[in-house]
Image (cartoon, grey):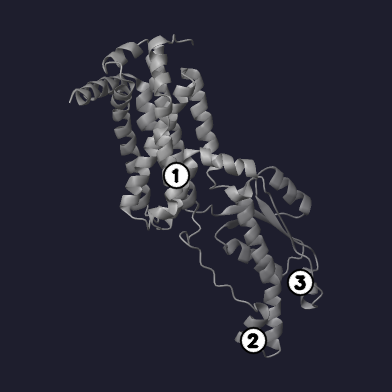
Amino acid sequence: MKYLSQIYHIALRELDILRHNHLYRFCMVLFPILVIFFFTSMLDDGLPTRLPVGIVDLDNTSTTRALSRKLEGFQMSQVVARYPSYSEARHAIQRNEIYGFLYIPKGTTEKLLASRQPKISYYYTYTTLAAGSMLMKDLKTVSTLGSAGVGIATMQAKGLSDSQIQTLLQPIHVDLHQIANPWSSYNIYLTTVMVPGILMLFIMLISTYSLGTELKFDSSKKWLAMADNKISVALLGKFLPQTLIWLAIVYGYEYYVFYHLDFPHPGGPWMLILLGLMQVLSAQGFGIFAFGLMPSLRMSMSISSLWAVLSISMAGSAFPIMGMDAPLQSMSWLFPLRHYWMMYQICVFNGYPLIEAWFHFAALAGFMLLPWLVVKKIKNAMLTYVYIP
């Protein structure tokens, strides 16, 4: 009962600190909520649509104009301009007016009808990876449709049936099944790693900041005295209010994206609750551990911010881990977000049982227990260290 009373009074002290320091309000409530709504609203359509594209049609026949209309009919592309020459279209890409253009040389229709295999070119920028790859798909498709259209007309004139024509044009039919994200929605797979990654960044920074300010404002001895110099009791009391606030933010985010925006989650609500708890506690554990390694406000916050920012790249969502060099593959296991992302993919996104992600669950539990390795050093710092700006 004595320890519970001490934890309770330290938690009340921490709540008073949170109430009077505006930085906590911004970094624990306002900024996380802004991040959640920023990413989900930015990717609300799932995929970028109506990307500006140009046409250079030097042939200008009914056949080539039909190709232009087909390109404009695609969801991803919007023909915003027609250029009289290749040079002007290239300059438009350099001015960021369009992301790509289709180049149809003079004599294309004549060569098509004579079966002389004309060349249609398309150019697209890869400065913006997503826009370039999507436009490439549309431009390639419309180029293929041009030759297919002439082929269909020729075979119909020869008296072939529709099934025979389909067999000749597409001998193998691809039956595509996109598992878990059949909509190819960027919102589903980007938001679910970027937002948790940024939330973990805030959690790590606030954890190190709250310990560092005890030294900065020379209140560390009073804090420990409230726990009879028992550092474990002092840490429990200090981080209990923060943990509850972070859990409210994380569970609010999960409810918003998985139930309001209806992101797929075959793993069910209990797996979401467990994953949110592991996310908060592992990030707090790493933040406390970073302060224990470097009992300095500036250095510990630098370590936490660097590790959290790197973890977004090392999580494996944007670039697969198996495609990285061997040292980077080994290093990826040192980031909490990597294990969070794997647990999310396995247990929430695909609905497999927790046993399939036991290693990542154990890794997150290990990050939660990291502070026990440095509690003595934290206690020594709080009692003897002098704050140096």
Badge nearest the viewer, 3 or 1: 1
Q: Dot 2: within a 10 Å radius of its alpha carbon, few (fewer than 14), some, or many (20 or more) residues?
A: some
User: Which mark lies nearer to you, 2 or 3?
Assistant: 2
Q: Amino acid at mark 1?
A: Tyr
Q: Quadrant of the N terminus?
A: top left
Secondary structure of residue under mark 1:
helix
Query: Which residue is denoted by mark 3 in the rendering?
Result: 109
Q: Residue furthest left?
A: 1
* Circle 2: element type: helix
Q: Earlier in the sequence, mark 3 or mark 1?
A: 3
Tally of numbered discs: 3
Label disc, if present, on residue 255 of the rendered structure: none
Q: Is residue 115 above or below residue 193?
A: below
Q: Mark 3: which secondary structure? A: helix
Q: In this view of the protein, can residue 262 be seen by the observer?
A: yes
- Mark 2 vs mark 3: which is more N-terminal? 3
In percent of width and height, residue 333 lies at 52, 41
One can see residue 206 in this view: no
- Tell which circle, 1 or 2, labels the residue nearer the N-terminal end: 2
- Return the residue at label 2: 164
Give the numbered dot on residue 340: 1
Q: Quadrant of residue 276?
A: top left
Question: Residue shown at 35%/14% (left/top)?
Answer: 220
Query: CB atoms at circles 3 and 1 under 8 Å apart?
Result: no
User: Residue at point 43% right, 11% down?
Assistant: 385
Residue type at mark 3: give it: Thr
- Within 10 angstroms of label 1, few (less than 14), some, or many (20 or more) residues? many
Dot 3 alpha-carbon crowd within 10 angstroms: few under 14, some 14 to 19, many 20 or more: many
Please name which of the two marks, 1 or 2, marks the residue nearer to the observer. 1
